[in-house]
Image: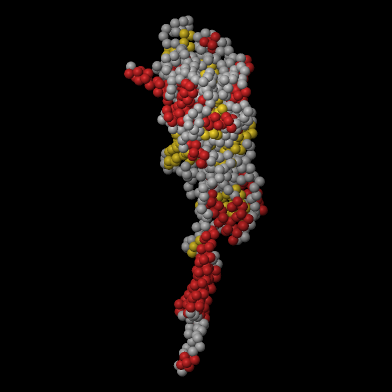
Amino acid sequence: MSLLAFGQPLVLFGLLALPVIWWLLRLTPPKPQTEVFPPLRILMRVLRPEETPHQSPWWLTLLRLMMAALVIFALADPIFNPRERLETGGGAVAIVMDNGWASADDWDVRVATAERLIADAGSSNAPVILAFTADKPNAEIGPFEAEQAVDRLRAAEARPVPVDRASVYGRVAAALETSPGATVAVLSDGLATNGDQAAFAALLGDSAGLIWIEPERLTMAGLTAVDNQPDAFLATAIRPAGDPAPRQITAGAFDDRGRRIADAVFSFGLGETTTVGEIRVPFELRNDFAAIRIDGENQAAAVRVLDENSRRRRVGLISQSEADQAQPLLSPLYYIRRALQPFADLVEPTTSDLGEAIPRILEQKPAMIVMADVGILPELAREALVEWVNDGGTLVRFAGSRLAAAENDPDLLPVRLRLGERSMGGSLSWTEPQPVAEFPQRGPFSDLTPPRDVAVARQILAEPTPDLFDHTWASLADGTPLVTGASRGNGTLVLFHVTPEATWSNLPISGSFVEMLRRVVQLSRNQGVIDASGRAGTQSLAPYRMIAADGVLVPASSDAEPLLVGAGASRGVTIANPPGLYGTDEGVVAHNLLPADATLEQLQRPATTLPVTEAAYAADESRNLKGLLVALALALMVLDTLAVFWMGGLFRQGGRLRRRTTGAAASLFALAALGLLVLAPDRVLAQESVPEGGINDIEAVEAISKTRIAYVLTGNSSIDAVSRSGLAGLTRFLIEKTALEPGQPAGIDVETQELSFYPLIYWPIDETSPMPSPAAIARVDAYMQQGGTVLFDTRDQFSTGIGLSGSASPSTRRLRDIVAGLNVPPLEPVPDDHVLTKSFYILQNFPGRYNGSPLWVEASLDASNLEERPVRTGDGVSPILITANDFAGAWAVDERGDPLLPTVPADPMQRVYALRSGVNIMMYMLTGNYKSDQVHVPILLERLGQ
């Protein structure tokens, strides 16, 4: 095909007029020049012989001929690199276009191809039928005028759903019944669907010709399944069968904030259409996966969103034994907890009362519940547990003395048990511990190697029933069951015939125990807020986040309808239910495009006797040169005008014209400069105002420039003055006695000011001050939870004492009202071995202006084996301290350092000890358990030497 074509070639005959134009231009003389009247010079010219008139210069004539030629060429509508026209036969044109997920990656090219067809139909005034195979059933398909069809095409978009050729082709065939002899153009995505050949037969029945357009090569890839296994996260990818060459693609795993946190590699071998990629990262990180997306693919099949079923399971732990902090290795749940923590969310009740513990666990909708040596269950709790198992829960039970003494419960045990346990040396016993036999191939432990170092000395025996072998997942060398399992309703029952601690066997302290529990957890199913399995009946879930055609997760559109999940509900992707997440903020169900058994087969052109024109998708690369030629002609016109002015002497009229021209140029330059100044952007200035509810930068810099102690402004001027002077006195003492150099104390308003800048906040309680608002209490609580400490001082020891129990003073009652809204841990008076007594000074009590009130701190864990430890403390700094000794009153000094208030009783050393108490408190705030560890150094060194 030629590189240049003309839309109106007959106009080129106008080039024949160029000789006539040349003759006219040569015949016409140039404009006479204007000269100043010189009488003598005119007389001299009169005496000269007559001369022939001047003609137009050759270069001006050539310039004008070029201008005329350019205009003629522009009117001929020249096109560079013209596209090939697709013959439509002159009749109606039916364009049937695939706009499913496979069309999204190059949708613009497909639209350009369709526009070419519509333009060709429009050139012959043929009506156009335009239909999309992934559109609403009631979408208008025409016939349209060419301009209407273009508008309809440009308004269409690719959709993240499969195409439905059968129904759309049927509608187009019905529309063509009134237009026999039409040309059908099929713009396919290249992928086959069920019923394609029958749909083509109906479409092409009365047609005069077929234009077949398909992609030159199918290179897309999609994700069909994911599997969060114990050691890796597996994702399955597929590609079309028509892409046989080896290929490697990558994918990224993204969290719910869209951050890429892991990568996977998929390698397709020669001719392979399915492959599996692995993501080997810690289970905690895999549990944060919210979506997997193939790199370089801009279509919905390359994205797979994940819901709760792809994350680690929630497991409830129940035991009737109290947790023994002094001997944790003997706790029934200790090894279970250690084994499950890496790959499950563990929930435990706060009580050992089964009547309360089981309902509380079930309220959290766990996937699995582990009961360690639980015997008889309360009836209501038992019924709730049986219902939970039948609805799909996995119940794992461990043997023990309680279970051995309980009666059989077929609803909560996988097999029938014999009463009592079998032990080494007793009846029904063996003379030596039994090892573990090979795991059965039909059970969940089939791929595990039996532990050779595990021996069982005691177990609970199962009754020898005909189906016992089928329910045995692991057994001992003598054939007796070690682990049994069975289905109940939609759930699973599992029983370990040994205890969960190392009393009956050493299985719980082996590595095989962890792997066995992992396999059992993988059998369970999360019972989050939404159960899409149908066991809870059919549910309707609102659209939450949808996958767009280009694979991006976007808010749900108004066209998306609620998704029905449950028994009998269809889970296919449709226009009404596009792929994405359905549910609410509390829980969602993933609705992905490709099912696990999906394949990508190449679409075959239908066998037909009609004339077929084959083409490929391609953008229109032709360029219309009309505008360029017109612009060149205008440029030559400007040159011609300037030449005429010059030949007429316009540029030789002296200084007045030059001055006028210079003035005009200066005016234009000034206007341009003024326009640039007006349009220039303003300088970016830093924000000077503080946003509402924000933090003043100056205040923040001042607060963090030095360590400062803060005190709460009560609104009582006398109390606030004592607090300010007291903390100033403590600051002075800290500078004199320690390496710490704090800044001046800061008074803060808990209602409005930021609290996190200060390690310690001193709060004098005043019963006459307004009660802090709930928002302020919440701010204080957040400050305490984030590592800050509040020192509450009721200052009433001299009158009534702190009164945490029994009668209370007004200040103590106000303190109770304040702490009622805080998450206050259990409190105790500072023990003799607490780190507060040794953080800087050695102290036994903590007096202030008054003496006698204990200093209350967070209670440490009690343990019976800590008598010889030199210091005891919790895992962190206590978030709350309470006293009634009026610390600020004892610390308060004037500008010269003299005390402002007397101590009660008037003991000079009491003020010294009060200041030392303040130093110990500050060291404790700033160093935490470092001081505790420092006390342990001599003993640690002594033990290392041993």
**Position in image of residue 129 (x %, y %):** 62, 53
Classify residue 88 by image quadrant: bottom right
Q: Residue at x 52, y 60 (%)?
A: 677
**In the picture, residue 816 is in which quadrant?**
top right
Residue at position x 50%, y 33% from top? Answer: 745
Percent of width and height locating residue 760: 50, 29
Q: Furthest residue to the bottom?
A: 47
Q: Is residue 811 above or below residue 626?
A: above
Q: Position of residue 671 (x, y in %)?
A: 53, 65
Q: Quadrant of the C terminus?
A: top left
Q: Nearer the viewer, residue 80 or 866?
A: 866
As displayed, is residue 400 above or below residue 625? above
In which quadrant of the rendered view does residue 678 lie?
bottom right
Residue at (64, 50) in percent of width and height: 141
Which scheme is used to colour this image of the protein?
Answer: secondary structure
Give whichever of 505, 110 is nearer the camera.
505
Q: Nearer the viewer, residue 905 or 776?
A: 905
Number of numbered markers: 0
Looking at the image, the residue that sits furthest to the left is 945
Residue 444 visible in the picture: no
Q: Is residue 177 left or right of residue 82?
A: right
Is residue 409 in sight in this rendering? yes
**Residue positioned 50% across, 73% down in the render:** 661
Whole-percent x, y for residue 470 in the image: 51, 18
